[in-house]
Image (cartoon, rainbow, N blue to C red):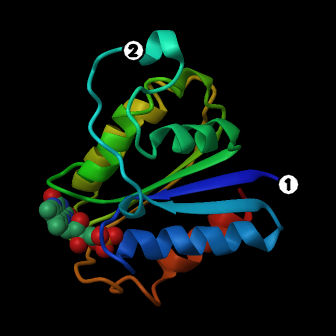
Amino acid sequence: MKNVLIISSSPRKNGNSEILANSFKEGALYFKNNVELVNLRDLKINYCFGCNACSTLGECIQKDDVNELMKKLLKCDVLVLATPTYFYNMSGQLKVMIDRMTACYTKIKADIYIIVSGWDNDSGNLEKVVNSIRGFTKDCLKNCPEKEVIKVGGFVETGDISNTRFVEQAFEFGKNC
Ligand SMILES: Cc1cc2nc3c(=O)[nH]c(=O)nc-3n(C[C@H](O)[C@H](O)[C@H](O)COP(=O)(O)O)c2cc1C
């Protein structure tokens, strides 16, 4: 049984990336993994102060939801990062969360799954978003192999991605994670 942590960063309930994140969750539950989906919009996450206090304290001095979230990242075997495309990049919500992982990121050991949705169908543009996330997952996390990526364009309104093959694909990735 694996600890599966899914971080969904869309501010929109029932957003396209969130639908994929939820489908991954359902797939991961199929084999009775221990699965948690965290919606960043439900948490209080301030910007990183850049103070570096965490390098001596081992945790952040800010009193928001980040220290609890870091514990979850340190416990997970599978980490899924789901984001809408915002101006050719990940959402600000996800970026701010990543910045706040400074105290713990060297200790994360998890298989990585990346989920990106956008309206733009251009695969190269979607890849830019994936690569921005890889700046964290690939270049900074040392024991975290990337397993699968779902990058999908053509979806604008919430729910647009429902009933597409991508939902099934996310389920399968969750099931096989
Ligand atoms: C502020 C903002 C910026 C966006 N920028 C882009 C973009 O650069 N490229 C793109 O393909 N879609 C862009 N979109 C569209 C969303 O990425 C797209 O609708 C996505 O499916 C939303 O995911 P969600 O439903 O999970 O929130 C933008 C949307 C917003 C609100």
Q: Amino acid at mark 2?
A: Ala
**Relative to the observer, which residue lies in front, 39 or 32?**
39
Residue that badge 1 annotates: 1
Q: Position of residue 24 (x, y in %)?
A: 60, 68
Q: At 53% across and 44% down in the image, what residue appears?
A: 69
Residue 109 higher or lower than 173, as above or below: above
Q: At 40% across and 43% down in the image, what residue appears?
A: 64
Which residue is outermost to the left? Answer: 87
Secondary element under disc 2, as helix, strand or loop, is loop
- State which image quarter holds ligand 1: bottom left
Q: Is residue 164 left or right of residue 70?
A: left
Q: Amino acid at mark 1?
A: Met
Q: Position of residue 117 (x, y in %)?
A: 33, 65
Disc 2 residue crowd, few under 14, some 14–19, many 20+, Cα 10 Å: few
Which residue is outermost to the front? Answer: 63
Which quadrant is the C terminus positioned in?
A: bottom right
Which residue is outermost to the bottom? Answer: 163
Which badge, 2 or 1, comes first in the chain's sequence? 1
Q: Position of residue 102 (x, y in %)?
A: 43, 25
Q: Is residue 138 left or right of residue 28?
A: left
The image quadrant of residue 33 is bottom right
- The reply to whether callout 2 and callout 1 are in contact (CB within 8 Å) is no
Under 8 Å from ligand 1: the CB of mark 2? no
| The disc label shown at residue 53, or none | 2
The image quadrant of residue 156 is bottom left
Disc 1 residue crowd, few under 14, some 14–19, many 20+, Cα 10 Å: few
Secondary element under disc 1, as helix, strand or loop, is loop
- Using the rendered image of the protein, determine whether residue 121 is visible from the camera's viewpoint: no
Q: Is residue 33 left or right of residue 131?
A: right
